[in-house]
Every structure is written in structure tokens, then in C-alpha cells.
Amino acid sequence: MNELANHDAMSLAALVKSGEVSAVELLDNAIANVETLNPEINSIVTRMYEEARATIKAGLPEGPLQGVPFLLKDLRALYAGVPTTSGSRFMTNAIPNHDSELVARYKRAGLVIFGKTNTSEYGCCPSTEGAMYGATRNPWNTGVSAGGSSGGASAAVAARLVPAAHGSDGGGSIRIPASCCGVFGFKPSRGLLPAGPDYGEVWNGLSAEHVMTVSVRDSAMFLDITAGSTAGDPYCGPTFERALLDEVTTRPGPLRIAVQREALTGAPVHADCLAALDDAVTLLEDLGHNLEEAKPEYDVSQSGAAFTLLIAANVQGAIDQQAELTGREPGENDIEPVIRFLARIGHDRTAADMARAIWTMHRTGREIAPFFDRYDALLSPVVATPPPPIGTLDTSSTNVDAYLEAVFKFIPFTSLANQAGTPAMSLPLYWNDAGLPIGVQLMAGYGRDPMLFRLAGEIEAARPWANRRPPICAAPH
């Protein structure tokens, strides 16, 4: 049955539709793989096996992904009756009485949700190694980070426990772990997916939800089944002329692509990350695209300060909301030291400060928009170092200065897409001499998600990655 781990989500759905395999068999196989491999990587923290069996027994909707096992990130993706802890000991008893709209759409597509994956506390760390559930370990090397905050999801997909898993991205939290674990990660344009009914937007529009996948076509299919606003949303995202799945097999034609080698923050970029970038440049040139070195221009210092304040304010807001619901303020051991430090920024600054941070974020989007009139896409590293050793980015650390320095050295490239609300993706094209995956990022202008999927499909066809599997993997090597 482990041959099933070779399939992507669309292929598994086709097997169910043809009757070659049942949803029960797929679920049983996925559960068996989780029970065997999860102790080594700690990617899944909440088992929902009985809920999944009940879902199948009740009759699955005849959606395009009927019967495919699926995992939710333990952050913001509400499933009625199942705790959503946000990776925090303070949120242990946060049990919703309803599904979020995105989860409802997953269910309508026929997916069988059978667990929740590990995340850093409140989704704030680019590595998944919080005190609540412990570190998620990279299937390529268990001594290094799987990335974050969607590290549990990326590790599960890399290990082929599932072909796709839900994640969220407020500063790179889909793309960073996708890079660390060697899978495909796509952050869609702002407003493309619903955040309701509990939110109109998340982190004032910085954060987007989507999936990490083995294949590009799965990522496109998941957007096709989930995209679109709902009544009461504060704004609508872009609309497209046709299904994104159709874009994957459409050639993009020659594109003008800018190449950014340096981090605008001044953070040094590791030689392995530059080697991955150079490798991607050669591939894209061979595919007929025109590449030249260029970088977007915006106020990096002000933008970074605004980004930090918006996250801090939203973390403090989440803590306050839970305190109000439970009638209990968090104790010293309820929130990790780094997150307490971050939340304090949100507590101490004024409402006017937050308003100005929102203005700065939107100005950043306007400042870089002309860049994407000149270039179809921007190619850069995803991260500035290979996956760091476990413990480098531990939010339980009391040395906040050392933690922040490590963060700034690791992820200087991803947050711009969140601030500008633009689509961006991490592609698994390169492995260093230590056998660790290092992704490259392609970012485009707002609403140009279809073009990125055309480009991703072309790259995947030219340099397939699905057969590259880590040492810890459910699929046969």
C-alpha cells in the first residue's frame, strides 16, 4: 500500500473515482504511515482518526479530491469540536463550535481531514520548535529545522505522509518550510482565499492560507476549489479567466525576470543559497527567459518596523481574546519568552502607531508595483542560509536578542510578498552537498498568480522533483 505514497492528491482522487482504491483504504494507509514515521519527525500533533472515519461513513461529497487524506495546520483552520491551539499552551482548550470557511471548502471538495500539524506559537517563528509540542524535525536530516511556521505541514508532505497539507504564510511561513523540506509552496495574492467567518483578514492582510504540495498541479487545484470571497468579506481578491489548473500545462512564453542576489536588509547570503539561485538562473535561461540583475526599491527600515508591529499587535490581540473568553490571564509559563516579548510590543504601542504601520505596509505595495510593470517576476533565494540546526530558532529561549539576530539572518527575502500582498512561491530545485534542500523564490505582481503557475508548471516539467525523497519517507525509494 505504500506505493500510494508515490501519488499526488489528484492521482489519489482518480484512483478513488475509478474504484481502484477506497477512501477507507487511503485513510488506513495514511494513518499507518503516520504511526510509523511521525515519532521521528513530530509533524502531526493532533490525531483526528475517528472524525475522519465518521466523515467517510457519513458519505463524502463528490468533489474533485474525494477521499484524499488531508492535514490542517494547528493555527486558524477551525474544525468544529477539535482544539486549535495555535501552538500555544495558553490555547489548549480553544475548541471551536464551527468550521472556518476554508475548512468547509476543503470538506466540500471531498478531502478527508485526519489530523493537525505542528506550528510555532501563534505562527510567529520561521522554525517549528515550540514548547507546546516540541520540535518538528526535517525528514532530510532530523538535526535541522523543517522551517516554520508551517513546519509540521511541510515535513508531512516531504515524508509523503500526505501529498498536500494546509499551511499559512504571514511572513514566509509556507515558502520557508517548503524550501527547508524540498516541497512546492505557493503563497497566493491577498484576498484570494477567505478568512471568515472569524476574520475579515488575518494580520491586517499580511497572512494568506494555502497548501504545501508535492506537485504544482495539486497546488493549482487546491486554489481552484478554495478561492473566492464570501458575503461580508472586507474586500475581494483577484479573479481569473480560467482555472489555475489549466495554467499549469500552458507555456508562459519568454518572460523578463529580475534576479536579486543580495538581501536588502544587509543580511549575508550563504554560498549554498547563491548556488541554488545560480542553478535556477541557468535553468530559466535554458527555458528561454530573459534574466537580469535588479531589485525592488522601497523603504526597507520603515517597512520592517511596520511588519513587526502589525504581527505584535495581532498576537497581543489573540492573547487578549483568549483571556476574555476564559476569564484568565496567561501565566508566565503559558506563553514562550520570545512571543511574550513580541506581544509586549503590540501591548505598549498606540492605536495610532498601528494605523501608521498599516499605511506603511500599503505604501510598500505601491512602491514596488512599478517594478512588476518592468519585470514579469523576481527570482531570489527563499532563505539566506540552509536549514539551521534545531535550537537556533527556539522561541523558548530567554536570549531574545540572539533569537532575533538568528531570524534576521535566516529570512530576509520572504516578507515583502506579504506586505505587498503579491503571490510568491518556493520551488525545490537544489540540494546542497549535505543533502539538504534549498528552494528558490519567484514572486510576481498582484493578481498574477496564473502566470506563476504557468512558470511553475514549465519548471517542474523541465526539472521534476517528485522522485527526490528524504531518508524518512513513506514512499518507496
Image (cartoon, rainbow, N blue to C red):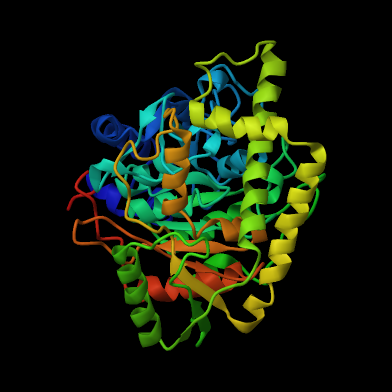
For residue 288, above or below residue 213: below
Residue at position x 30%, y 57% in the image? 437
Seen at 65% across and 64% down, the residue is: 299
Q: How many marks?
A: 0
The answer, for residue 242, to whether it is visible in the render is yes
The image shows residue 270 at horizontal and vertical percentages of 33, 62
Residue 17 at least partly seen: no
- 462 relative position to 102: left or right: left
Q: Position of residue 151 (x, y in %)?
A: 41, 42
Residue 87 placed where, x, y %? 49, 29
Is residue 222 positioned above or below 73 on the image?
Answer: below
Residue 253 position (above or below residue 30): below
- Considering only vertical position in the picture, is 415 above or below 450? above
Picture quadrant of residue 184: bottom left
User: In the image, 477: left or right of 212?
Assistant: left
Q: Quadrant of residue 427?
A: bottom left
Q: Is residue 330 left or right of residue 176?
A: right
Quarter residue 429 falls in = bottom left
Report the residue at 31% width, 34% height from top.
34
Q: Quadrant of the N terminus?
A: top left
Q: Closest to the observer: 33 or 351?
A: 351
Return the residue nearer the eye: 226 or 456: 456
